[in-house]
Amino acid sequence: MSNDILVFAEQRGGKLHPAAAQIVTPARDLAGKTGGRVIACVIGGDLGAAVDAIDRAGVDAIVTVSDPSLEQYTATRYRSALAAVIAKVQPRIVLLPATFMGRDLAPRVAVRCNAALATDVVELTIGSGGGLDVRRPVYNGKASCRVQFPAGRLAIASIRANTFAAPGGGGGAARESLPFSAAPGDDRATFKELARAGGEVKDVTEADIIVSGGRSLKSEENFKILFDLAKALDAAVGASRAACDAGYQPHSRQVGLTGKTVTPALYIACGISGAIQHLAGMRGSKVIVAINTDKEAPIFKIADYCIVGDLFKVVPALTAEVRKLRGA
């Protein structure tokens, strides 16, 4: 086992996932403590753009596994490909983004490589015993726990998106390509079709900025003002459970305990009172802006910026100002 840190650089359609660049930041910090390198692993079909993007994030080396059968993600084939890179590199620690793909892939690779695993991590360091020491939220963010890995065992951790800022200023990393060899059983799952729900609208779990609306929007048509603001901010649109249950938005956009957990850099809650189940899904946001006519709304207790006002007046005004600032 080396002292190197291996980063799974997730890509989709040849484009590097933003969360993949973000985990280079904790990887560099860990490498500084272990005395190793940061090595990125990129798996897929056409990887040119993704490899260049992770190179710019400041990794020391890049290992690619490219094959037509890896063009679309399948858990078994990606598991075999990443396990092969781990066997080649012999890293001390493997980091993956806690995306849909990362959550699916990490435990499979951990089993294949007989590694220890922690998921949805928000803090990492090297413990006094020399093993990886991480912190991860539990009970929907109400508490956190520490996980200590044994020093002599491969440690795998998935990192919550938007926990770290993506570094830059890299370039010139050494590159190596490994051939892909499917393992027995890899063909049990095959890719058939990719169907996107909601067209090209951003998914709330992968957006840096989210504009969410509650039942106070009163109709699906009124959500247009949120979509206008989201477009100006290059953001995703979310909704509370009440708004989704009322049919104003599909449940694929629901944020909360029974919906999706999000951790964007900026979360704008419009007409959302702040029920416990909703707060559980978004309280990890770095900056929270709440717009509500009720100054006693629970969401104001956790918001960084509170606007007591009519969302039908405030949101269009915000949209106009954003467009003005961006020259749109």
Image (cartoon, rainbow, N blue to C red):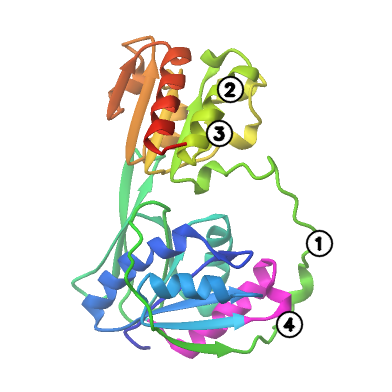
Direction from residue 79 to residue 209 in the image, left or right = left
Quarter location, residue 27: bottom left
Q: Which mark is residue 192?
A: 1
- Specify the amino acid type for callout 3: Thr
Which residue is the site of mark 3?
258
As measured in the structure, the alpha-carbon distance from the residue carrying label 2 to the one carrying label 4 is 49 Å
Which residue is the site of mark 4?
184
Category of crowding for the residue at label 3, using alpha-carbon neighbours closer than 10 angstroms: few (below 14), some (14–19), many (at least 20): some
Chain-order first, disc 1 or disc 2: 1
Question: What is the magenta segment's predominant secondary structure?
Answer: helix
Category of crowding for the residue at label 1, using alpha-carbon neighbours closer than 10 angstroms: few (below 14), some (14–19), many (at least 20): few
Q: Which residue occupies 53% across, 36% down? A: 231
In this rendering, the label closer to the viewer, 1 or 3:
1
Residue interval drawn in magenta: 66-91
User: Element under label 1?
Assistant: loop
In this rendering, the label closer to the viewer, 3 or 2:
2
In this rendering, the label closer to the viewer, 1 or 2:
2
